[in-house]
Structure formats: structure tokens, C-alpha cells
């Protein structure tokens, strides 16, 4: 087993004393003020940023951009540049000591020129928190018995299980192999599916979090253990308790997912077991909840199914996912994305590690802003689940492509008939000129180009067409991402789960417009309205967004504001979303996971010179 130790940096006696006093005060304060979980524990990260004050600017988007700048500056001010600062930031934010090997991790991160802000790792602690109330031995057994594993043995990566030669397993294996030499032996169970698989009931998660918080005390220095000891299952360990993964393969996914929400949440109280997916959706033209005058102000809540019951009929994940294999039984499993209620432990998505230009555009991130077409571009398959003749109008990608089709808008405006997938917007909601003059369709035709490359029927038919959607959608040729970077605006919409193009869009010199219900590893690193434009999952705000940035009805729009966000996202992605940053994140995650599955986890900690 690996032991972690390193010679501490030298400080003067007074400096050492100051750091000692600060850490002792923080640890004492932690023990005195620690409370158990409140009434709204969910598997999601609370939004740490302030919302904008209303009415300070001519347009609400300007309020949101201004507040995003302030939030980002506050984040930058938290950067840790020394091991002492990093340790102190950890103790303050986590109310606990860092894991063994924390100093070597920090040295590794510095060597990779990483921006080290403790907030960037919040996802790790949200994901792992319930497991502190879960027996470590049982976690090790469950991890060891899972079908798809990545193992670390003597500093080397090994894949284990049935049919492990899969693209995602290979990519995650390569990522973990790049940091395996620094880690103790581990069994890392992997979710090989697109969809998330674990939704433990809210009541169970709340109980485990409360129990774990009670157990996770800060031991006296004399009782601290600084080496990992039991992180895998030895051949002749004690009896293995039985565990049934108990996967459920059918039934409405909303009912399964809503069980992960608070009992008094809108998702539970508004559940409709007899939901009629054959009926076209009715989307309120009013401003969505958690918005600032119609535009997303709370990104976490905008993505949360617990707080948006209308998603039951507006997203393929809940209408009919491509595959369902969900369990209520909590056990350790790693994956690339999840809903706010899912209990997987997130890794950077496997496709973010690939060099495949299909997901990244390759080395080309796009030319100068002024050379790009002043339009929004979207290409993709009609994925999102099993779209059938009786439910296709409920799928998010079908809705978005229809809303970006000028002909559909023009026909609806002239006939007065509502479109099959969305509700026509009113002028009062976003004051877009075309909604008042009847020219919305003509305007969208000029500034947007969205099309499917494959209609993906279920049951499958001759590609790329589909008999029940052929009358409504024209199929276009695939467009490489590097060619999409010739456009200024890049909407990004969920497919079967998260969109694997998002990192590439962020790194480009174009502006991502993002709608999603999925959480990813990097969420704490990105500031909405600073690095990308958030969009509501109903897409009711898309016309207002495009009107503000591109302009309509003679208005020139706000091209410089769009450019500033695009370039801020591009520059920031080169600093915090690199492959090196994924290595730093996974190294830190697996240090914490190794502590969590160790029988001595409450006593395991990094001891600095100031301990």
C-alpha cells in the first residue's frame, strides 16, 4: 500500500504559529457549529453566486452579465497558491481535514498549472457525502462485484469485467491510468450506459447524510492515520454480505426519479401517473420560475427536475428513455453525468478525454469573431430517447428544431394553429418584435439554421428518415464541429443524456447557448452569463436571447456582449477544462474515494507541519 509523505515547506516560527492557530480555531468552530442536514438535501450543488438586483439596466440580460462578472471575480479571489492556503481553504469549506496525499496532489496540480480554487471540487463532496453514512466494507464489496470496473493495482490501471473493451471504458481507463501511480489500490465501478442508473429515495439519502455528518469528526492529532490500508477486498476477508442491485427495467422514469426529491417538492406533488404523452405539450408563455425577467438566473434550480414538474412531459429522459436500468439501492458507481436526483459519482465525461474531432472539432477552435456568420447553428440526431408516433412531440430536440424553423413559425402565425411541439410566444413575455408584427418566422429563417441529420424512429426504420416525422422535418447533411465554429451562436441541447459537444463549444471562439437537465464534473468551474448563455429547458427564452444579441426589427443587437462571453468562455476553458484539469480532478476524487472505502476513514487525514 502506498504511503504519502512529503517534507513540508519551511516557514518562520511566527508563520507556523499563525497557521496553527487559524486551523485550530476553524476545527474547533466546526465541532461546535456542525449541524445535520436541513429539509432540502438533494444530489445537486447549491448555487453559490448572488442573483442580480432587478431593474438596474436597460435589459435583464445586462443585469445577469454584470452580476456574473462580479461572481467570477469573487471566485478568482479564492485561488490557493500555496499548500498552506489550499489546506486552509479545504478545512474552511469541508469542515474536515484533507485526505492523506493532499500535499502530493497539490504539487501535482501546480505542476499541471491548474487554477486551484476549492469551490471547483464541490461536485466531489456532494457526490460522496451520502456514503459517509454507508459502511466502507460494504462499499468495497459492491464495487468489487460490479460488472464493469477500472482497478488500480500497484500504481497501474486494469480493466475488469464483462466486455470491458468499450469506447467509454477505454477512455476512462486511460484517464485514470494517467494518475494511477499516485493512488492506493482501488476498485472503481463504472456506469457503461448513457443514462444514469441510481435514484435512492430522498429519505434514505437524508438519513445517510445525517449519520455520516455525525460520524465525520476531527480526531486529535495523536489518533490521525496518514496511510490508506483497506481500499479493496482481500481474497480471505470476512464474509461478504449479499447485495441485490435490484435494477428496474420498465415503468415511467419520472416516478422513479421524483423519489429522489424532497417529499414536499413540486416534482412529487405534481406527479401525473396517467400523463398523456400523445397530446402536444402546452408550454406557458409566462416567464419561467427561477428567472430574472424571463432569463435564467438560478442555473442549478433551472436544471432541477425536483423544482420543474413540467419537465415530466418536455424531456425524452422522462417521456421514454432509450434504456432504463434504474435502482433505488445506493452503491458506489462512477459515471459521466447525472440528474440532480441521481447518486452516481461523477467523472469527467469519457468523450471529453478523446481527441475525436466529432466531439471537439479537433485543434481548430474557430476563427475571429468578426469573420463568423451572425447566425445560430445546430445539427444533431433526433435522440433523447425512444421517440414514437404517439410521443415524439414531447422530445426536447424535436421541440428546439421546430422552434428554430422559420416555415413552421410562419405557418403557425398565418393559420393561428398551434405547432405540434411548442406554444407560440406572446409579445408581452419577451417583447421580440417579430411576435408582434407576425414576422417571427422570417426573422428566424435569417438568423438560425437548425436541422436533424437522422430522425431515429422507434421502432427503427430506414435511416435517416422516419414516416411520422418526415412531414415535419427535413434531414440535413452532417456538419463537422469545426465547420459549426464558423457561426457565432452554438445552441447545445441534451440527447440521450448530456451533450458530448459542450466542452468543445466552450473551448471554441463561438458562443454556447446551453439548455440541460444534467449535472457534470465541471459545473462549479463555469459561471452562467460569463462563460456561456444559459437557456431554460422549455426554450421559451430563446427568441429573447437571440433578439438581444443579434437584434431584430431594425435593432442592431449587442454583438460585443456576445463576443465578450464567447471569448471569456474560450479563455477560461483553456485554463480549467483542459485534459490536465481532468487529471487533477480525478486524482483528487479518487483520493477522497480511497479514504471513504477505508475502514479507518474517520481517522484518515493529511497532517501538515501545522497539525
Image (spheres, rainbow, N blue to C red):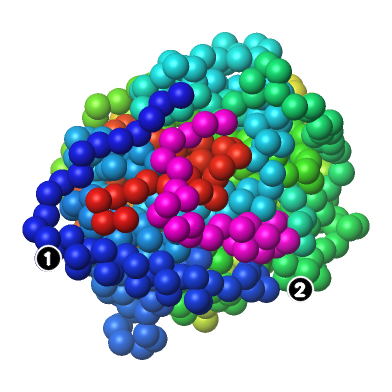
Residue visible at 34% across and 48% down in the picture: 607
Binning the other alpha carbons within 10 Å of mark 2 as few (below 14), some (14 to 19) or many (20 upward) gives few
Q: Based on the picture, tell me whether residue 208 belongs to the magenta stretch.
A: yes
Secondary structure under the numbered disc 2 in the rendered image: loop
Which residues are drawn in magenta? 205-230
Residue visible at 37% across and 85% down in the picture: 53
Residue sitting at the far right: 274
Where is residue 443? Give x, y as percent.
41, 59
Secondary structure under the numbered disc 1 in the rendered image: helix
Where is residue 46? Give x, y as percent.
50, 66
Binning the other alpha carbons within 10 Å of mark 1 as few (below 14), some (14 to 19) or many (20 upward) gives few
Front residue of this view, candidates 508 and 451: 508
Q: Based on the picture, tell me whether residue 608 belongs to the magenta stretch.
A: no
Where is residue 270? Give x, y as percent.
80, 69
Q: CA distance from mark 1 to mark 2?
A: 53 Å
Residue sitting at the far bottom: 55
Circle nearer the N terminus (1, 2): 1
Residue visible at 87% across and 44% down in the picture: 251
Front residue of this view, candidates 335 and 35: 35
Number of marks present in the image shown = 2
Residue sitting at the far front: 222
Front residue of this view, candidates 472 and 530: 530
Residue visible at 46% across and 24% down in the picture: 1
Residue highlighted by disc 2:
264
Is residue 160 among the parts visible in the rendering? Answer: yes
Left or right: residue 32 compared with residue 278: left
Where is residue 271? Give x, y as percent.
82, 63
- In the rendered image, which quarter contains the C terminus? bottom left
Residue highlighted by disc 1:
14
Is residue 519 among the parts visible in the rendering? Answer: no
Amino acid at each position: 500500500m502506498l504511503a504519502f509523505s512529503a517534507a513540508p515547506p519551511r516557514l518562520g516560527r511566527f508563520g507556523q504559529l499563525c497557521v496553527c492557530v487559524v486551523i485550530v480555531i476553524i476545527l474547533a468552530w466546526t465541532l461546535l457549529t456542525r449541524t445535520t442536514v436541513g429539509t432540502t438535501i438533494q444530489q445537486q450543488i447549491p448555487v453559490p453566486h448572488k442573483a442580480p438586483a432587478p431593474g438596474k439596466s436597460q435589459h435583464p440580460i445586462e443585469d445577469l452579465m454584470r452580476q456574473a462578472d462580479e461572481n467570477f471575480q469573487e471566485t478568482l479571489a479564492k485561488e490557493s497558491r500555496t499548500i498552506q492556503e489550499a489546506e486552509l481553504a479545504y478545512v474552511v469549506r469541508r469542515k474536515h481535514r484533507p485526505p492523506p496525499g493532499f500535499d502530493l496532489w497539490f504539487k501535482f496540480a501546480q505542476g499541471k498549472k491548474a487554477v486551484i480554487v476549492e469551490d471547483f471540487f464541490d461536485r466531489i463532496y456532494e457526490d460522496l457525502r451520502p456514503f459517509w453514512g454507508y459502511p466502507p466494507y460494504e462499499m468495497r464489496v459492491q464495487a468489487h462485484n460490479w460488472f464493469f470496473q477500472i482497478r488500480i493495482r500497484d500504481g497501474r490501471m486494469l480493466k475488469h469485467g464483462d466486455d470491458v473493451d468499450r469506447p467509454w471504458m477505454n477512455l476512462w481507463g486511460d484517464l485514470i491510468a494517467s494518475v494511477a501511480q499516485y493512488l492506493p489500490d482501488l476498485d472503481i465501478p463504472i456506469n457503461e450506459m448513457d443514462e444514469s442508473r441510481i435514484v435512492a429515495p430522498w429519505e434514505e439519502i437524508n438519513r445517510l447524510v445525517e449519520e455520516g455528518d455525525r460520524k465525520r469528526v476531527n480526531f486529535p492529532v495523536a489518533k490521525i492515520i496518514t496511510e490508506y490500508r483497506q481500499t479493496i477486498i482481500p481474497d480471505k476477508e470476512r464474509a461478504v454480505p449479499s447485495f441485490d442491485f435490484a435494477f428496474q427495467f420498465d415503468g415511467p422514469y419520472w416516478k422513479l426519479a421524483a423519489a429522489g426529491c424532497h417529499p414536499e417538492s413540486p416534482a412529487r406533488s405534481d406527479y401525473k401517473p396517467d400523463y398523456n404523452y400523445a397530446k402536444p405539450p402546452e408550454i406557458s408563455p409566462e416567464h419561467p420560475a427561477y428567472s430574472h425577467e424571463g432569463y435564467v438566473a438560478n442555473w442549478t434550480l433551472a436544471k432541477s427536475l425536483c423544482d420543474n414538474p413540467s419537465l415530466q412531459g418536455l424531456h425524452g429522459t422522462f417521456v421514454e428513455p432509450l434504456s432504463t436500468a434504474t435502482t433505488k439501492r445506493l452503491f458506489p458507481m462512477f459515471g459521466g453525468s447525472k440528474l440532480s436526483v441521481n447518486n452516481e459519482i461523477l467523472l469527467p465525461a469519457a468523450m471529453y478525454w478523446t481527441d475525436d474531432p466529432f466531439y471537439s472539432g479537433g485543434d481548430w477552435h474557430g476563427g475571429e469573431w468578426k469573420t463568423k456568420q451572425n447566425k445560430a447553428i445546430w445539427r444533431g440526431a433526433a435522440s433523447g430517447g425512444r421517440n414514437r408516433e404517439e410521443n415524439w412531440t414531447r422530445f426536447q430536440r424535436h421541440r428546439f428544431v421546430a422552434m428554430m424553423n422559420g416555415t413552421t413559425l410562419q405557418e403557425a402565425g398565418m393559420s393561428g394553429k398551434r405547432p405540434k411541439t411548442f406554444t407560440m410566444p406572446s409579445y408581452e413575455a419577451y417583447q421580440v418584435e417579430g411576435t408582434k408584427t407576425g414576422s417571427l418566422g422570417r426573422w428566424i429563417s435569417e438568423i438560425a439554421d437548425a436541422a436533424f441529420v437522422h430522425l431515429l424512429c422507434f421502432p427503427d426504420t430506414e435511416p435517416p428518415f422516419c414516416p411520422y416525422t418526415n412531414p415535419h422535418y427535413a434531414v440535413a447533411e452532417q456538419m463537422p464541429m469545426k465547420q459549426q465554429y464558423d457561426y457565432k451562436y452554438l445552441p447545445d441541447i441534451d440527447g440521450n443524456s448530456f451533450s458530448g459537444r459542450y466542452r468543445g463549444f466552450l473551448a471554441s471562439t463561438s458562443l454556447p447557448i446551453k439548455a440541460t437537465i444534467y449535472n457534470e464534473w465541471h459545473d462549479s468551474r463555469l459561471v452562467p452569463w460569463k462563460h456561456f448563455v444559459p437557456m431554460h429547458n422549455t426554450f421559451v427564452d430563446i427568441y429573447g436571447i437571440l433578439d438581444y444579441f443579434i437584434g431584430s426589427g431594425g435593432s442592431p443587437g449587442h454583438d460585443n456582449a456576445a463576443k465578450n462571453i464567447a471569448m471569456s468562455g474560450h479563455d477560461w476553458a483553456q485554463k480549467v477544462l483542459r485534459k490536465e484539469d481532468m487529471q487533477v480532478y480525478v486524482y483528487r476524487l479518487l483520493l477522497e474515494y480511497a479514504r471513504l472505502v477505508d475502514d479507518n476513514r474517520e481517522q484518515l487525514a493529511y497532517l501538515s507541519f501545522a497539525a
